[in-house]
Image: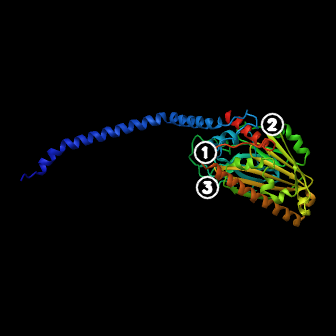
Amino acid sequence: MTIITATTMAVLLKPMITAHRLLLFQTQKHTSIIAKQQKQHGSLLVASSVHQSDNYCQNLVDEFDPNIPIEKALTPPSSWYTDPSFFYFELHRVFYKGWQAVGYTEQIKNPHDFFTGRLGNVEFLVCRDDDGKIHAFHNVCRHHASLVASGNGQKSCFVCPYHGWTYGLDGALLKATRITGIQNFDVNEFGLKPLNVATWGPFVLLNLDKEILPQQEADNTVGSEWLGSCSEFLGANGVDSSLSYLCRRVYDIECNWKVFCDNYLDGGYHVPYAHKGLASGLKLNSYSTKTYEKVSIQSCDGGSTESEDDIDRLGSKALYAFIYPNFMINRYGPWMDTNLVLPLGPRKCQVIFDYFIEAHLKDDKDFIERSLVDSERVQIEDIVLCEGVQRGLETPAYCSGRYAPTVENAMHHFHQLLHHVLKE
């Protein structure tokens, strides 16, 4: 039996240890070189990834042909409604460009009034200063990115809840706490980042990609840019600032935002099947649709019904205006309600209903309550429809559908507008 001493073992193991150390050194060196290369080429890798994603999404866009007449056209593929990459692609192409409705003037009626909101990943803040001027900002503190304000109400200034940095209603940084010793810091460069804001009628709009315009210039141009040639028509048909604001209802719906828009734009096709109560108060054979540059108008005469309340609520004519990409104005009888559809994810959206009424009825609580109950019933019926459609879009059984040419031209127009923007 051979006995191996500690000295002999050390001699035997020395070459192995040396080789291991050499391998470890080479591995560490190789890893360091790779890390250095990744750091050097990181921006190229990110750019390549974004480019690949854009190419992928452009291929999905090309699966819909906007030039085929509605009688022969297929609807956009289900991937437009289900694919996560496509959702983020259209956020940048659709929602971060052009004027977007975000609120109403009643929310900032008085000096110091403000409200906040979110569009995609953009947090925003709208307020009115002491001089009555409206401002809009990214709702993000310039110190460490905390949200500066939440909800709505009145404030004389905005104090960040994180570290107390304070901003004026004009966005200027008024106070930065505990920054003794800070260098290369210009207080004038650290105000809230501004956004373009304008008003049209009772609505407040933001533009995320436009250079900041003077308030008067923005107000003068927003009508033509947002509504096109439809601006005067809407103003002449009761969509104005004379109505009294009543209340808000918010619905979180398990469907892509475009599913809700499509449902709105089917020319009343689904009304006799899904909204029997509503259908009884409308003359559906009078339904008509007219399209403008970025707007479609659906209208329908009011009909006879056993319930006198329905006649009062719907009036003699109902007008349904869709303003690309996600805003709807419904004017009927003494009522106006608006629907703002906010994208929350590939299969989730939030729809905000704001209700307005002619001033002489704003104190008629019984009439208002009955009308809101009727409206709520219709919204719940639509939610069931939209969530069912989303589930169907996610199955392997469906890719594209067809249009009903005599009634779904507003929906086809919406898809054409989307395609145009997504190809830019």
Q: Earlier in the sequence, mark 1 or mark 2?
A: 1
The residue identified by callout 1 is 83
Amino acid at dot 3: Tyr
Q: CA distance from mark 1 to mark 2?
A: 28 Å
**Residue 188 visible:** yes
- Type of the residue with mark 2: Glu
* SS at mark 3 in the image: loop
Q: Is residue 190 left or right of residue 16?
A: right
Label 2: which secondary element: loop
Residue at x 62%, y 38% (from the top left corner): 60
Q: Of all residues shown, which one is farthest toward the bottom?
A: 366
Neighbor class of circle 2 (other Cα within 10 Å; few <14, some 14-19, many 20+) is some
Q: Which residue corresponds to the image point at 72% horizontal and 37% vertical from the top-left?
A: 73
Amino acid type shown at disc 1: Asp
Residue position marked by numbered label 3 in the rendering: 162
* Front residue of this view, candidates 356 and 281: 281
Task: Tell me the crowding category of disc 1: few under 14, some 14 to 19, or many 20 or more residues within 10 angstroms, Cα based.
Answer: some
